[in-house]
Amino acid sequence: MTIKIKKDDNVFVLAGKDKGKTGKVLRIDNKKNRIFVEKVNIIKRHLKPRSAQEPGGIIDKEAGLDPSNVALYCSKCKKPVRFSIKLDKNQNKKRICKKCGSEI
């Protein structure tokens, strides 16, 4: 299954503990089918010190979300939207908001 959301897209979280939040996509893991969104689904990670320069401790980091739990966020509509793909005159693919018709 291919993920239609790309890196640096703004997305809206539809389900889970952070339902209703928006954020920017940091990275996508196609093998594990996960999307990592900035400041969403934060977990605590305990790290051992690797050396004297790199101390250990507890850090906060983003955990992955399933792609079905996020929707593309239209900045014009200010809502999560579905989108269609259209070709422009130069045969380049453009994602179009189904609600307002603007390019995402």
Image (tube, rainbow, N blue to C red):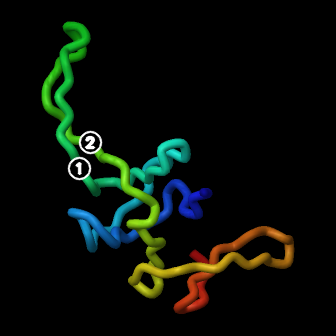
Q: Position of residue 19 (x, y in %)?
A: 26, 70
- Residue type at mark 2 is Lys
Task: List the single residue furthest toward the left.
Answer: 57
Task: List the single residue furthest toward the front.
Answer: 1
Residue at 40% across / 51% down in the picture? 36
Give SS at disc 2.
Answer: strand
Does 82 sit above or below residue 11?
A: below
Does the residue at mark 2 contact the one at mark 1 (Cβ under 8 Å)?
yes
Give SS at disc 1.
Answer: strand
Q: Position of residue 61 (x, y in %)?
A: 26, 42
Residue at 40% across / 83% down in the picture? 79
Q: Which residue is mark 1?
A: 42
Task: List the single residue furthest toward the bottom.
Answer: 100
Which label number is shown at residue 84?
Answer: none
Image quarter where the C terminus lies is: bottom right
Separation of residues labelled 2 and 1 (CA atoms): 5 Å
Instruction: Say which quarter of the image contains residue 92.
Output: bottom right
Q: Position of residue 65 (x, y in %)?
A: 37, 55
Residue at 85% across / 78% down in the picture? 89
